[in-house]
């Protein structure tokens, strides 16, 4: 399997579960600044956890899942690529081994996760992969190409119509969803979003 020409990121289930964080990451990916990747197993994990959290039946978030796939058509790291690697890896939580295996087989430069301690640098860096919190990752994208990323955030806010979000309420939502640095940056650029 060939690598991706753009910076490639494996998105962990924990960053796909909260809609605000997921939408921010995929909105920025849709600009072409980076390639977002994940697996069907990751889809199953975030949907199962969200269905349980919200008391919804299995399959309830299928439309959201399909929209995510449409937003990032090259999203999938296939099971046939990552499964042979999974058992050869060792992480503090064995359930995360498939995430690292997918990052390796998907030629990811980075894993974006809230669970940094689950991916120790001593293990992950040997594969040339860094692990970043989504807030740190989004700030890096803003610093790389502020105009493109701010435009992505503006489009994201414009899509939110029920209820509509002011720039301030949009920024507050990002902050509530564990993206404080991103929120702080956007407060300074609120007129642009």
Image (spheres, grey):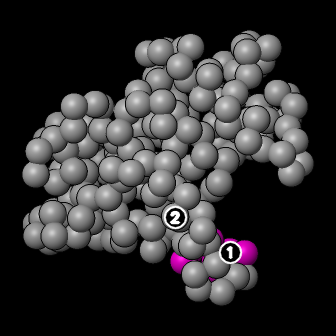
Q: Which residue is at 56% across, 14% downward?
A: 147
Instruction: Let me know if residue 143 is in the magenta part.
Output: no
**Which residue position is annotated with label 2?**
66
Q: Position of residue 189 (x, y in %)?
A: 72, 14
Q: Residues within 10 Å of mark 2 (few under 14, many from 20)?
A: few
Residue 102 as seen in the image, left or right of residue 193: left
* Quarter where residue 40 is shown: bottom left
Total marks placed: 2
* Residue 87 visible to an observer of this rendering: yes
Residue drawn 83% across and 45% down? 161
Q: Residues within 10 Å of mark 1 (few under 14, many from 20)?
A: few
In the image, is 94 to the left or to the right of 83? right
The magenta segment: 48-54
Magenta-drawn stretch, dominant element (helix, strand or loop): helix
**Residue located beneath label 1 in the image:** 53
Which structural element holds mark 1? helix
Kindly identify the residue that appears in the image at 41 percent across and 38 percent down. 132
Left or right for 122, reference 13: left
Q: Quadrant of residue 129?
A: top left
User: Vertically, is 27 above or below 22?
Assistant: above
Query: Label 1, label 2: how many angstroms apart (C-alpha)?
Result: 20 Å
> Which quadrant does the C terminus fall into?
top right
Q: What is the x, y in percent for residue 178?
A: 65, 42
Q: Is residue 186 above or below residue 163?
A: above
Contact (CB < 8 A) between labels 1 and 2?
no
Q: Position of residue 79 (x, y in %)?
A: 22, 70
Q: Earlier in the sequence, mark 1 or mark 2?
A: 1
Work out whether residue 173 or residue 27 is closer to the camera in this orientation and state it.
27
């Amino acid at each position: 399997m060939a690598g991706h020409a753009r910076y490639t990121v494996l998105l962990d289930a924990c960053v796909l579960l909260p809609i605000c964080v997921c939408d921010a990451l995929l909105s920025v990916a849709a600009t072409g600044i980076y390639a977002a990747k994940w697996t069907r197993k990751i889809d199953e994990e975030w949907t199962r956890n969200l269905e349980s959290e919200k008391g919804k039946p299995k399959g309830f978030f299928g439309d959201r899942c399909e929209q995510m796939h449409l937003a990032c058509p090259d999203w999938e790291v296939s099971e046939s690529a990552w499964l042979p690697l999974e058992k050869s890896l060792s992480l503090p939580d064995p359930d995360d081994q498939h995430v690292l295996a997918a990052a390796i087989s998907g030629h990811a430069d980075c894993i974006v996760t809230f669970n940094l301690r689950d991916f120790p640098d001593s293990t992950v860096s040997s594969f040339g992969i860094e692990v970043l919190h989504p807030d740190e990752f989004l700030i890096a994208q803003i610093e790389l190409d502020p105009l493109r990323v701010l435009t992505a955030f503006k489009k994201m806010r414009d899509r939110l119509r029920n209820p509509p979000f002011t720039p301030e309420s949009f920024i507050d939502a990002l902050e509530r969803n564990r993206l404080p640095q991103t929120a702080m940056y956007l407060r300074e650029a609120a007129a642009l979003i």
